Amino acid sequence: MKLLEGKTALITGASKGIGRSIARRFAEQGANIAFTYLSSVEKGLALEKELIETGVKAKGYRSDASDFTAAEQLINDVVGEFGSLDILVNNAGITQDNLLMRMTEEMWDKVINVNLKSCFNTVKAATRTFMKQRGGSIINLTSVVGLRGNAGQANYAASKAGIVGFTKSVALELGSRNIRSNAIAPGFIETEMTAELDQNTVQSWREAIPLKRGGTPENVADLAVFLASDMSSYITGQVLQVDGGMLT
């Protein structure tokens, strides 16, 4: 029996990196997959095709989760198309790094909107469906940066810290309806983006981690499967770090 058999999952920002790995892992475990992408249209279409080939139902939506009305429409479309929604993964996120003195208001607003407001938008829109079926698993992607801060990332750190407070509040509000809300805080995860960085710098980051290596998107996806499945049915309001011991 696959862990997510018969469940429907929606994953935001799934055309690449961690979101893509979560979509693949969920499909391997039998979930039907709805996902969003915005600028990476070709990658989004390729992922949809790849997921369908695994034998599950899958559909990509070009949608901006930071837009309140668009998020509401997205949830309605997914429930209409798939007939249910059991798992919501808020993965969409961006960075616009700069020192506070050089950070513009636009850089602040954009990161807060895409990273934090999108969580409010999708969770609020999905709550009615979750409450009606008396069940659901909400998984929000935060970051170790949201737990400890990072120079040059005041906007990103604030957005990710906000996700922690939001996740815990939702867990308290919706727990009586059997709706769970948890957050995943990845540390240094090696993706296409980190492959383009100076490898000496990357190696020094690895050396600072107790496990002496960076994580993979699949490491994050494996935890997402656990939190989405009935194996974690008594876990809510938690922030789980996937960081190799970086924040210990």
Image (cartoon, helix red, strand yellow):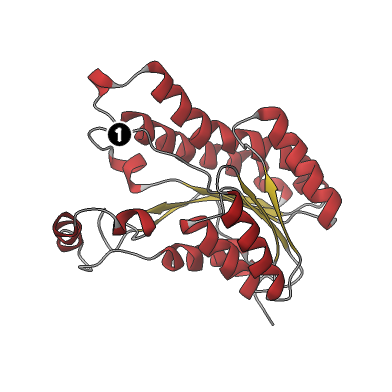
| Residue at 25% from the left image edge and 38% from the top image edge | 150
| Residue at 67% from the left image edge and 29% from the top image edge | 68
Q: Position of residue 188 (x, y in %)?
A: 30, 56
The answer to whether 48 appears left or right of 169 in the picture is right
Task: In this rendered view, identify the residue nearer to me: 89 or 164.
Answer: 89
Q: Position of residue 148 (x, y in %)?
A: 28, 41
Q: Residue furthest bottom?
A: 1
Q: Disc 1 marks which residue?
A: 153
Amino acid type, residue under disc 1 in the picture: Gln
Examine the image and state in which quarter residue 48 appears: bottom right
Q: Quadrant of the C terminus?
A: bottom left
Q: Position of residue 41 (x, y in %)?
A: 60, 49
Q: Quadrant of the N terminus?
A: bottom right
Task: In this rendered view, identify the residue nearer to me: 57 or 120.
Answer: 57
Examine the image and state in which quarter residue 20 appears: bottom right
How crowded is the residue under tag 1: few (<14 C-alpha within 10 Å), some, or many (20+)? Answer: many
Q: How many marks?
A: 1
Q: Looking at the picture, does residue 52 appear above or below residue 240? A: below
Q: Looking at the picture, does residue 25 appear above or below residue 134? A: below
